[in-house]
Image: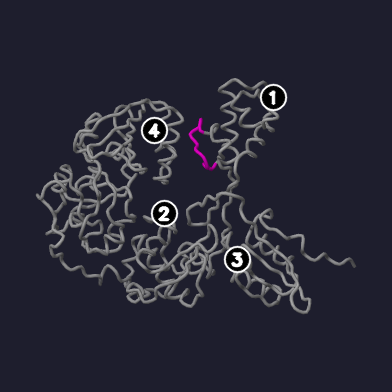
Amino acid sequence: MFQKPFRIKSCNVMKGSERKRWKVLLLDHFPAMSPDDLNELLPSKGDVSAIKLHAHCGASVTVVTLSKNPMLFELDGAVYPTVYALWKKPDMLQSLTTHPQVFSKLKGGADLMLPGVVLRNGSQYGRTSFGNLAKGDPCAVDLTDNRAAVAVGKTALSSTEMYESGKRGKGVLVLHTYEDHLWQMGEATPIPDLGPPFPTGDDVQEGDQVWANDNDSNAGVASEDRVQPEVSLQDSQTVECKSNLESMDELLYYCFIKALKTSARNVDYPILVSTFYGTHLLPGVPAGHVLDLKKTSYKKFGQFLKFVREMGLIDVKQLTKGVESIVSVCVDHPEMRRFKVVEEDVGYGGEPEGGGRRPYEPPQIEELYLVSAHTATFFKLFGYGKSSPLSGPQVRQCLTKYVKDNGLNRDSIVTLDPMLTDLLLSKQEAYSVSNMNWEEMTLRCLNKMNPGYRITFAGTKPIVRRGNLESIELSVARRASNKKVTLVHNLEVFGIDPSEFAHAIQVGVAASTSISNTPNCKAGLQVLVQGNQVAFMSKILLDDYRIPQKYIKGLELAPKKKKH
């Protein structure tokens, strides 16, 4: 994209609100970045500019520079770091490694072909050979003798598709390289020596093919029809020896397939993802191993499920809003047929002994306030757009900063300027109210915003939703022969498996239970228990499942204790 000169449309020093917007964009695209990483790329005080330009291909690009060096560029809504940024933060992007001979082709406008990718796990060709990438994800390219990035682009295939292609076809659609015109816009510093990405002696195989696909010339073009050496899956795809469990990614994959083949073999699907993870996957971790999701390339269990779903192993759907369930398993998949259990003893790997099931972990719930159309003008001053989620303290922080920056506070009273008047007052009040105390001002602002919430289950990515979180509903009804029954709804919202909950109630009160779809076209399942069991259910929900009382409706329906 930047191999040829481009035309600059505008260049402006970036304001504080614009820097905040870019930091939000960076966090959306690269959630693993820390506040220090963000401040290093976009410092609050520094020479940061936004440059809009037209590339020779006709694309409009926004480039962010720091001290004249381009650090980021935005293309078609996606944000990419430049080689300057990746030299500062090498782990910002997943990277594919190639030979130095290929780089000369990449500089000329070539895309990186999969035959030219050097596998990080040596001669073994496995499902983790190409990392954990979705199609179109930003990706860096480095060399076998230096992990400093020499090119940036987006993936032409997902990691799964790269693996299934037999290492054929395009791997990375290159957008920017070292020594192109975007690099020349900066100080034109040479590539720093960050050391090899992995031990080259073990990973560069004799006879590795070095090809690239050049869009402008046929020199060095990899032929799609060229016969590739057969890849034996016997060693890399089966999990028949414990040496294959050294990688955290392979350990996670091993435990997942093992759970499907053993403890979850006779499960009635659908099953909650959180229940599957805690009840079936974790107990299958081999003794002597510790499974840590944060040390995998997926970081979150949801990303791993996306990977195995692309492989065709499972199907995952949201049967209840915001809560994912595994709805089916392909038992005839080659990976399922090939799998063999390698150890007899199972355990959590680091969990206390004596437990065959991971304790339920209640989700973390945070009430949020979403920027509404009415409040959008005010919060735009702080880099927040419409529907941006904010916590209560963040809202108060914005109000406090605005009041103090404009000198509107007198002790505990705030003078309302036109901006605050439009934000807080109705049309009738605008002519009669000129000041307000801090507490009322904050409360009014919160009431003008839309409700929302953030819910985070153990090992999964936080979910932000508009509206109020649905509560667990307890109700008492009468059925045939005027007998009372207790109904429970919305257990799945909090990651509670209705089957396990019904079993706990059945054992605890010695009453029959049943599970059925919620009537009136409402998604989810309902649990029915004979008799008025609200008292026992409330004890289970509050003490065992640790659900906050404000998220449980119907506690007052418990039968009152008789006076003696």
Q: Name the residue under label 3.
A: 521
Report the magenta residues as a range: 380-389
Q: Distance between the residues labelled 2 and 1?
A: 54 Å
SS of the residue at dot 1?
helix
SS of the residue at dot 2?
loop
- Nearer-N-terminus badge (2/4): 4
The quadrant in which the N terminus is found is: top left
Q: Mark 2 points at which residue?
A: 299
Where residue 542 sits, quadrant-wise, is bottom right
Q: Mark 1 points at which residue?
A: 431
Identity, as a three-letter code, of the amino acid under mark 4: Leu
Residue 263 within the segment the image draws in magenta: no
Where residue 293 sits, quadrant-wise, is bottom left
- List x then y, in percent, for residue 157: 28, 56
Q: How far apart are marks 1 and 3 (CA)?
A: 48 Å
- List x then y, in percent, for residue 456: 53, 53
Q: Nearer the viewer, mark 2 or mark 4?
A: 4
- Identified at 39% across, 76% down, the residue is 331
Q: Name the residue under label 4.
A: 42
